[in-house]
Image (spheres, rainbow, N blue to C red):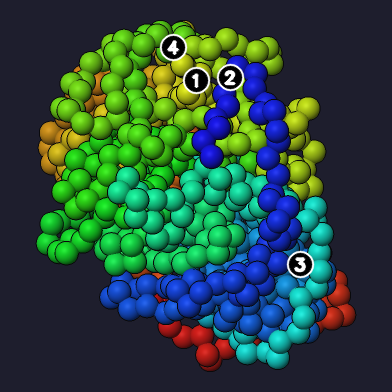
Amino acid sequence: MLDLYVGPHTIPPQAALPNPALPATLFECVQRAADLATHTDGVRFADRKEREIWLPWAEILDRALRSGAALRDAGVHPGDRVALVLPTDPIFLDAFFGVLAAGAVPAPLSPPLRLGRLAEWHTRTSAMIRACGASAVIADSRCRRVLGETVGRCTPRLGVLAAESLHRHAPAAALAVNDDDLAMVQFTSGATHPPKPVGLSHRQILANTDAILDFMPLNARDPDGHPYQPACVSWLPLHHDMGLIGCLFVALRRPGPLTLLSPDDFLQRPALWLRAISRHRGTLASAPNFAYALCVERIKDEDLDGVDLSSWRFALSGAEPVSPRVLRRFHDRFASFGLAASALTPTYGLSEASLAVTCGDPRQPFRARTFSRGALARGRAREITRRLGVGGPLPHADPRTIELASVGRPLMGYGVEIRGSHGEMLPTQRVGRLWVHGPSLMRGYLDQRDQPIVDGWLDTNDLGFIYQGDLYVTGRAEDAIVLGDTRHSPHDIESALDDVDGVRAGCSAAVSEQNDDGETLIVFVEYRTQRAELAEDCRRAVRTTTGLDPSLVVLLAPGTLPRTSSGKIRRRQALVHWKAGTLTPPAAVTPWLIAGAMARSALGYLRARGRGEEADPVDGLEAANDAAGTDSVDVS
């Protein structure tokens, strides 16, 4: 189970591939789940009032077969790429698995999460639809009301199809595909560059899913010999790999039960996540670092009346830098509700590798070590002290040191290397570029010349080092802040602000700017409550924790910092907008804003229809025009 491999140049002796005894494609997994699953296995959708919709795997299969037939009748051909702009809802499963049943390739995209940022969403979404070459877009009624502006820019051949009606079609058998066929297009987060389309085959996705399941035996027994109920509880968006592959596909591959909450509901009431874990005896529940900080900040004891978190074995933390301080506080806050110290498990992964590459040891508390800040800035890892991740008092801030969490060791079949700027191998304890190898690496970015894979190894563009067999990630190469001749991690600077009274935890961005005096440090901070001393308190916190003195602290209203669709802050974009004078809060969502968005959407549909008729005699935009009609009124 836990045969882990790591080193400066390591490939496991036996490459891990999808289990040959299991189905070779995603849709075959749905068919197997429908045949094998018990009455407790399937997908449950919970809303903010904790009302639930339950779909067993057999019903999910039936709806997928109906949806696949509807899509073929609508003109979707085998191999077509189909963009999905859908919320966390049963219709997402209809569309995703329906596209697979039609022999086509789904490309999940984010719905418009913030109506006050619609202009930016239209620009990014239309670019992604063009980048993946989608022949159609499937959207729900709420998205269709404002989607026309996006469609007018990219004009997919079949226009926009209504997700709600797909599963009402008569069922038809699914089209067969091979395990090496393209199964899905997922996009990179776009934190430092525009999102890129990652093409993944069935074999690659299932290799990663099997590696995750091999590392985390969800049917294992606890120390008292009692079996754990394998159950996943997630609020992560299904257009993001951590939610789609790490939760939905893991539950499908077992098969087992999965409980889904919407990201919006979690952000407004994070206690819903922990309550659902308790109610359904969740075993696996993953989240980025900011979500653990949000839970500590926002959840009150009265929100957790009767909650028991003792079933939660795998509280994975990934998708962004992991803060030992945040995980330690999360455990300290919720240990009295049964959360085990060993549950908190840092991980590392990326879209280009399907999802997971390394994972901490789930049998023990996460490992955190303290390193010399100055040595790291010069490219070397020198440990000052060693401590386990939880237990004992919080360490005092020392600007000469930095505490980092280990993200563990590679999953079975994966390897990691640390290389220098010229591709040379670096020894352990040297900071360099992180390269990874494994059976789930993407084929490449779709239809793009520049590829980061060389001889089977992927340049992740992340920086890190190996210390005593564990991988430590220090940040993105492009995000590194260079002051003088030393490099600093922006996350380290930003995390120093989380404890400042009035600052929104996880809502700051540290960047450097070149001027006549050299590189200067600028810190953007969203406030929770504004006060006269806040900027100076932020400057003092950075100076005390890191030894760096920001040239400028810019206080921003909540929601101002630009983010990716998965919630990552786009640091360089924040600097660009600030210099242009356009770093402003989202527009207030008013009836006038909604009416204007709908009017522009209707015009976009008309423009797309005109272009479609000029380019193709087939009127493929009828569904889009219908979507802009009288049945699309409520955008609340």
Callout count: 4
Tell me if residue 230 can be seen.
yes
Choose the circle earlier in sequence order: 2 or 1.
2
Residue under numbered circle 4: 381
Marks 4 and 3, Cα distance to the nearest angstrom?
47 Å
Q: Quadrant of the C terminus?
A: bottom left
Choose the circle earlier in sequence order: 4 or 1.
4
| Local secondary structure at mark 2 | loop
> What amino acid is found at the position of numbered circle 1 in the picture?
Gly
Left or right of 306 in this view: 356: right
Depth order, front residue of 44/68: 44
Q: Nearer the viewer, mark 4 or mark 2?
A: 2
For the point 80% across and 73% down, which residue is it? 175
Residue under numbered circle 1: 469
| Local secondary structure at mark 4 | loop
Tell me if residue 117 can be seen.
no
Classify residue 594 by image quadrant.
Answer: bottom left
Classify residue 474 by image quadrant.
Answer: top left
Marks 2 and 1, Cα distance to the nearest angstrom?
7 Å
Q: Nearer the viewer, mark 4 or mark 1?
A: 1
Depth order, front residue of 376/551: 376
> What amino acid is found at the position of numbered circle 4 in the picture?
Ala
| Local secondary structure at mark 3 | loop
Residue under numbered circle 2: 7
> What amino acid is found at the position of numbered circle 2 in the picture?
Gly
| Local secondary structure at mark 1 | loop
